[in-house]
Image: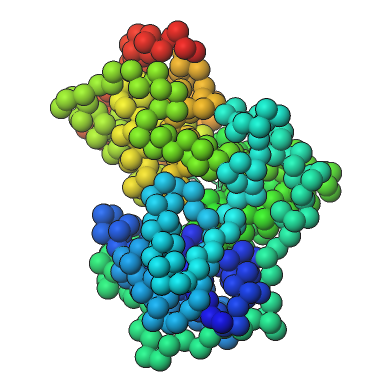
Amino acid sequence: DKSLVWFRRDLRSFDHAALHHALTLSGQVYCAFIFDRNILDDLPKYDRRVEFIRASLLELDTALRELGGGLIVRHVHAEQAIPELAAELGVDAVFCNHDYEPQAIARDAAVAATLKKAGREFRSYKDQVIFEKDEVLSLAGKPFSVFTPYKNAWLKKLQTELAPAELSAYEVDALNAHFAPLPPAMPAIPTLGELGFEKTNLGELQIPTGMQGGQDLLDDFAERMRNYDSTRDFPAVKGPSYLSVHLRFGTVSIRGLVRRALDAIRMGAGGSGAAVWLSELVWRDFYFMILYQHPHVCESAFKPDYDAIVWESGPHAEEIFRAWCDGRTGYPLVDAAMAQLNQTGYMHNRLRMVTASFLIKDLGIDWRWGERYFAEKLNDFDLSANNGGWQWASSSGCDAQPYFRIFNPLTQSEKFDPDGKFIRRYLPQLAKLSGKHIHAPWRVPAMELQKAGVTLGQNYPHPLLQHDEARARTLQRYAVVKKVT
Ligand code: FAD
């Protein structure tokens, strides 16, 4: 019998649950990836992710060819195309890995139903997380909504009950791989132009793509993992792993990453950095679980009372939102962070917290606006983590910071970019200001500004507002939820 493996956010040929099971269970295996028009048609035509995916597909195709197979790539509507392709190839089953986003769940259900009508099977596996859905539950048998007890239960489950099964790789054994030959006259993988997209600066940024790129980043990070806990909060320092885009598109395996972290913890020295990093991977599982258990978070607050908050609206709101998007708030750390996002598609985690807090709790803008902007710009955009991060910052989330905790953008700047090194990298017009002055140019004596070549209102904006006043307004705005916090 024959089967089709449908690749989605798992663009690798090793340690791959669906591929492993298809090769184990069926005589001949085809592989396919669909550039789904349902997703692509709505995207702005400058999108680094499409280029990242395409580059990763070229590598995946080569890897599959070396195993005797190859990748069928089409640019169509996946929901209709997969059952059609299954019919065309005459396969008995379609194999893929679980996706936890509501739209993907609906799409997969539709595909499964169409396949079933034609007597074909749809088989889907856990692959992109360690524990999913209701695998980690409280003693009362309920899904967790607070992170720390979830993490403790997650670690316990990993270490005691299931460690070998959950962490062992899904082998794709070259000797036993029996791929079906590619159909004759198979068109090449579409170019960016054929997909309707422009070339981006992905190459200039030297963001490594594909399995090799993920492996290189992991090897590089392995050296730094021991220091992760002390370096991860400073955006000017190469502290984190930069693996998020690879986790997003599955060019690395989560099981492989967790194994690396556990090995470092076991080796003792430098274990605390690895333990903190492992926690971040647990946050990832946590937010996938939250999204799966509470799909309403896509549109509304996890804590419903927070939907009573009245946000800024009208042309003024649009204007200050635009200023935030473009990095024109007059707060250098916020503006440098937005420049990092706009220029590279990445933003350091500390800065995601700072910019999100600034938009919501200084500018009074609905967190969903910021969430949407990040969704459009982040290379690593993941509905679960992005929504979790935004709801954390707005205090409406499951395990969010309390509503009265409002980041002070100046204190954050002085603490986490003490010499202004990160700010200088993205705001060269402020580069000549001293480390002391760079955080709040409006407080700098005129002479100093002049010496540094900074003219407020000309080459750098006046601040949009004063944080203390904004803070007071926010506390009032959040008064409607005081009773529930
Ligand atoms: P590292 O510090 O090396 O962490 C390793 C991995 O752990 C990350 O790649 C990521 O998969 C996971 N991780 C780390 N922190 C978190 C977290 N808080 N929640 C869930 N997973 C985490 N992460 C995304 O992957 N996609 C998003 O769309 C996203 N949006 C965010 C929005 C906001 C407002 C905030 C505050 C955070 C968001 N994050 C998101 C989480 C985090 O900022 C990024 O995962 C991290 O900055 C990616 O860089 P890295 O791979 O170098 O991370």
> Looking at the image, is 219 positioned above or below residue 456?
below
- Quadrant showing the N terminus: bottom right
User: Which residue is nearer to you in this view: 146 or 241?
Assistant: 146
> Looking at the image, is 251 positioned above or below residue 425?
below
User: Which residue is nearer to you in this view: 11 or 303?
Assistant: 303
Residue 2 showing in the rendered view: yes
- Residue shown at the point (58%, 59%) measured from the top left: 125
User: Which residue is nearer to you in this view: 137 or 196?
Assistant: 137
**Whole-percent x and y of residue 38?**
30, 58
**Whole-percent x and y of residue 47?**
33, 57
> Looking at the image, is 24 positioned above or below residue 336?
below
Q: In which quarter of the image is residue 158?
A: top right
Q: How many marks?
A: 0
- Residue shown at the point (75%, 42%) measured from the top left: 157
**Whole-percent x and y of residue 109?**
42, 56
Q: In which quarter of the image is residue 43?
A: bottom left
- Residue shown at the point (77%, 50%) measured from the top left: 163
> Looking at the image, is 75 positioned above or below residue 286?
below
Taking the view exactly as shown, the residue that stands out farthest to the bottom is: 184
Residue 407 shown left or right of residue 261 in the figure: left
Taking the view exactly as shown, the residue that stands out farthest to the left is: 315
- Residue shown at the point (60%, 50%) measured from the top left: 129
Residue 255 shown left or right of residue 101 in the figure: right
Colouring scheme, one of rainbow, by chain, secondary structure, one colour? rainbow
**Whole-percent x and y of residue 166?**
71, 53
Residue 221 showing in the rendered view: no
Residue 414 shown left or right of residue 475 in the figure: right
